[in-house]
């Protein structure tokens, strides 16, 4: 069964550095998402992306964050000038169509980001 | 706003016991409701969903019924196995692009 893959599985970065989290969505999917889960807290929506632009973003997704689909297969989340509070598990997801009720979101295994 | 509240864990059960995880929601309009499961070391997997009132989602012996009158979507399984040990997340989508998750309930099933 096709799956969403995320790399790396664990990223350790010094505070203030930039980090890029990578995702390869399922190949025929058109909608892409990033979520994060701070340890002990809920999974939180960050951003959704369709047709090479952001379709929705949360208030967490400020100017520090950006997303990109640099080629036909990768979907990346860039975090500039990382802060301690950015430490979390970051999940990528994709779906074939919009409105999750019609086509479910498929999630990757996550990237654990640790900011030192 | 939209939010999901699920019963706090952890929940520890013996094999073949009955499992219920309560989930209630607050939303405008008529959201779709989901249960996701996260097995150790893995990502979130869709377990089941319901898109309108009175719908029952089911998968792998798990069931949940969309109850609009009580704004609930409780997850049940009649006889759990050790392999059901995981974290279970209730979630909703008000038919836009994002999922709103509950805090997750850790379930441990002992042999």
Image: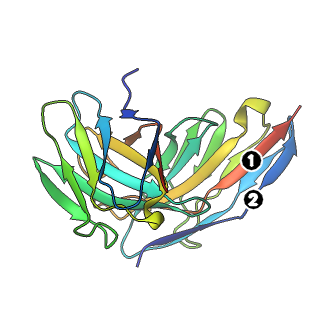
Q: CA distance from mark 1 to mark 2?
A: 7 Å
Q: Position of residue B19 (x, y in %)?
A: 77, 48
**In which quadrant of the rendered image does the N terminus of chain A lie?**
top left
Mark number for residue B9?
Answer: 2
Residue at the far bottom in the pictured view: B1
Can residue A103 be seen in this snapshot? no
Mark number for residue B89?
Answer: none
**Residue ID at (34%, 51%):** A34
Q: Quadrant of residue B39?
A: top right
Mark number for residue B107?
Answer: 1
Secondary structure under the numbered disc 2 in the rendered image: loop
Q: Position of residue B6 (x, y in %)?
A: 63, 64
Q: Position of residue B96 (x, y in %)?
A: 28, 61
Residues packed near mark 1 inside 10 Å, few (<14), some (14 to 19) or many (20 plus)? some
Residue at the far top in the pictured view: A1
A51 lies left or right of B90: left
Vertical relation: B30 (above or below) B75: below
Q: Position of residue B80 (x, y in %)?
A: 78, 37
Residues packed near mark 2 inside 10 Å, few (<14), some (14 to 19) or many (20 plus)? some
Q: Quadrant of residue A27?
A: top left
| First along the sequence among labels 1 and 2 | 2
């Amino acid at each position: 069964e096709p799956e969403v893959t995320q790399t790396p599985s664990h990223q350790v970065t010094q505070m203030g550095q930039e980090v890029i989290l990578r995702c390869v969505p399922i190949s025929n999917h058109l909608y892409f998402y990033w979520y994060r889960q701070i340890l002990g807290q809920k999974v939180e929506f960050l951003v959704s992306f369709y047709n090479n632009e952001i379709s929705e973003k949360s208030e967490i997704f400020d100017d520090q964050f950006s997303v990109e689909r640099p080629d036909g297969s990768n979907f990346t989340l860039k975090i500039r000038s990382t802060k301690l509070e950015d430490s979390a598990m970051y999940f990528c997801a994709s779906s074939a169509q919009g409105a999750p009720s019609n086509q479910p979101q498929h999630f990757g295994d996550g990237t654990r980001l640790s900011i030192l | 706003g939209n939010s999901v509240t699920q019963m706090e864990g952890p929940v520890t059960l013996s094999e073949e016991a009955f499992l219920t995880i309560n989930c209630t929601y607050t939303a405008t309009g008529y959201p779709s409701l989901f249960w996701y499961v996260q097995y150790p070391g893995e990502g979130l997997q869709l377990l089941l969903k319901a898109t309108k009132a009175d719908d029952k989602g089911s998968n792998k012996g798990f069931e949940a019924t969309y109850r609009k009158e009580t704004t609930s979507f409780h997850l049940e399984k009649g006889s759990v196995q050790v392999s059901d040990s995981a974290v279970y997340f209730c979630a909703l989508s008000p038919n836009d692009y994002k999922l709103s998750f509950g805090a997750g309930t850790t379930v441990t099933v002992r042999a």
